[in-house]
Image: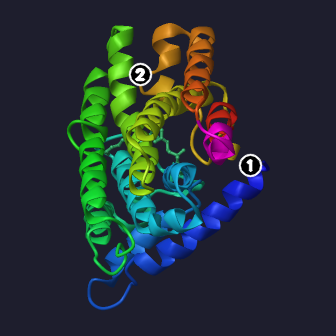
Amino acid sequence: MDLKSYLREKKEMIDGALEEFCPQPEGPAGVLAKAMRYSLFAGGKRLRPILCLAGASTVGDAEAEKAVLPVACAIEMIHTYSLIHDDLPAMDDDDMRRGKPTSHKVFGEAVAILAGDALLTEAFHLMTDEGSTRQLDPALLLRAINLIAASSGHLGMVGGQVVDIESEGKQVDPSLVEFIHTRKTGALIHASVSAGAMLGGGSRDEIKAIHLYGRKVGLAFQVADDILDRKGDSETMGKDAGSDERKGKITYPSVLGLERSEEIKRGLIREAIDALGNFDHRADPLRHIAQYISERNK
Ligand code: GRG
């Protein structure tokens, strides 16, 4: 399959749906929707929502993929909130994101914090909106929302972020790097593909296999990101390369070295693809996305 065309087609589908689902900047609180839209449409790869669609189409059909669109978009809203908050002076204090000035640089800290809050809450508003989710089984939707919430909160992304911040500049055990990465970045990626498979009507075994795939690519994504920060090019990435090292961040290369990190990444991608062994060609997008995660340059 041609992954480039696949990713472009799915990104267009997601962008169109996000345009519909994200509030318009109207009325006295218009600046909030303006800030939400600024970050949401700043040129992200849409990897998490694409994984959600691919999870659904691996176990279901094109209709299943369309039905999960609101959930896929909600996940992108949660991801975008995390980036806005992560860039704030109190956290990573970054000026550039997705090749553009960060939200707080454009709107000020207060509006950036609120835009993040509003994206997070809008995600749950959208996933519980009867009109948008009417094609989904309510019991499965409840399970998917539960997984997405757990992966985003103290057990997942926020939990990983707090340990990440508290570990900065310290000597840590390799197991702590894995703890941070599986939660900070891996959890939402895992939830994206798993929620897609659950909502697409996957069987118990299918969901189990896709769970495993999600765990492996979720961790591989962050290992790849760490490696990119060391080896990547700022212009291509749209953010500062080498910033992890300057900030004393806990990363795979800083704890285990670059070579070992590359090996770990390749091993995780292999395990992710192996987890899909019992699926037919419908899992090809997931197989190719795993490779892409390993080889991406931004
Ligand atoms: C602030 C609650 C809170 C959590 C922050 C995800 C996260 C936790 C911080 C992001 C920090 C960061 C840059 C991590 C590296 C991996 C990562 C999430 C990169 C950005 O994701 P991409 O590459 O971004 O999918 P795009 O812009 O393509 O959506």
Q: Position of residue 104 (x, y in %)?
A: 38, 59
Between circles 1 and 2, the one closer to the viewer is 1
Residue at the bottom extreme, as displayed: 27
Specify the segment rendered in magenta.
Answer: 279-288
**Is 158 situated above or below 48?**
above
The reply to whether callout 1 and callout 2 are in contact (CB within 8 Å) is no
Q: Name the residue under label 1.
A: 3
- Of the numbered discs in the image, which one, if any, rests on residue 248? 2
In the picture, measured across the screen, residue 182 lies left or right of residue 121, that is: right
Magenta span has 282?
yes
Which quadrant of the structure image shows residue 114? bottom left
In the rendered image, which quarter is residue 261 located in? top right
Q: How far apart are marks 1 and 2 (CA)?
A: 35 Å
Image height of 161 relative to 97, above or below? above
Splitting the image into four quadrants, where does ligand 1 fall?
top left
Tell me if mark 2 has few (under 14), some (14-19) or many (20+) residues whose alpha carbon lies within 10 angstroms of its own.
some
Is 151 included in the stretch rendered in magenta? no
